[in-house]
Image (tube, helix red, strand yellow):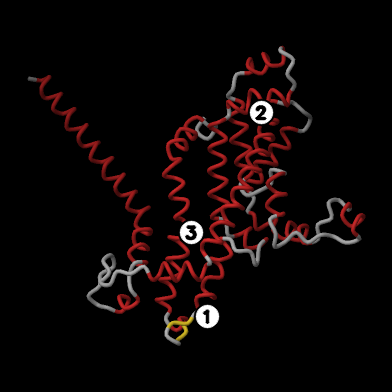
Amino acid sequence: MMIVKLLSLENWKRWLWAMVRFVLIVGLSFVILYPILQKIATAIKHKSDLYSPPVVVWIPEHFTLENFKNAIKIMDYWDTLLNTFLLASITTILTTASCALAGYAFARLSFKGSKLLFAGVILTILVPPTTILIPIYMNLKDFTLMGIIPLLTGDSANLLNSYWPFILTSVTANSLKAGLYIFIFRQFFRGIPKVIEEAAYIDGAGVGKTFLRIMLPNAFPAIVTVMLFSFVWQWNDSFFTTTYLTSSNVMATQLSSLPYNLSIQLEGGVATNKDPFYMSMVQDTGGILLAILPLIIIYLFVQRYFVESIERSGIVG
């Protein structure tokens, strides 16, 4: 009889804990998805639904895709999408390569001042980017490459409003969140047994060949993690992108100028800036749904690799 009661008590505890986990997961999912679902419900509403009392928040009375059409037209969406994808891809590839080299050096190579340099890498994670924005901006505006460019051309080069700031910072492992990527690679390379490298050295391979032929192929989980993080953060970046690029058609600059572009559009001969609710509707459609739609599609295809890479990389090690 006592055994039956204990089994019954254990079943009740197991059932209760399962219910608690279910409630927590549903609650967290709702908190995360609620803003997106609300934006979708708003985006498919007609303008007249904004002032219709019978219309509830989630269900529009007049279903329409006009808001998407307006946002696509105002943002020059397809050209903007291509430019943003090109910029994010270039910075992702260059950042991954440079941070992999830096992470391997910190993990495996012994050189004077390595600990001090790695402390500087960690400091780049902690320091807000706004504190170093002005000197970076001035250096890029009057770029001299240690005085070589003025010596050859007679004047400094202005790299602003081009992709060069992103290329240079990515090549030198100084791009957005590069300190975190170096840390991820360092932790991963430290977890690889040294006997693998020692065997390569015995066979006559140097440091570079060992890194390319042995270490880099084994770092696939860390590479996937860094590439996904780098692509998403560059895609969503509005701080550096709007600072370096002012007239290029990329997602960040188009979103920052969307309120102005929307305010000068005409609808039936009346400027839309007289209707702030309609402006907000189109801004939400373009600024949230159209901007994150490519990332959602990418995530659907790579989520399995992303989860596996997170588990095997140095983030949770």
Mark 2 and mark 3: Cα distance apart in space = 37 Å
Q: Which residue lies under the disc numbered 3?
A: 291
Q: Earlier in the sequence, mark 2 or mark 1?
A: 2
Which residue is located at x 65 percent, y 35 percent?
100
Mark 1 and mark 3: Cα distance apart in space = 21 Å
Q: Secondary structure at mark 2?
A: helix
User: Percent x, y for residue 11?
Assistant: 17, 29
Determine whether, in the image, residue 304 is placed left or right of residue 250.
Answer: left
User: Percent x, y for residue 113?
Assistant: 77, 33
Mark 2 belongs to which amino acid? Ala
Marks 2 & 3, CB-CB < 8 Å contact: no
Mark 3 Cα-neighbour bin, 10 Å: few <14, some 14–19, many ≥20: some
From the image, which quarter does the N terminus lie in? top left
Which residue is located at x 33 percent, y 73 percent?
46
Q: Which residue lies under the disc numbered 1?
A: 264
Residue 307's image quarter? top left
Q: Which residue lies under the disc numbered 2?
A: 107
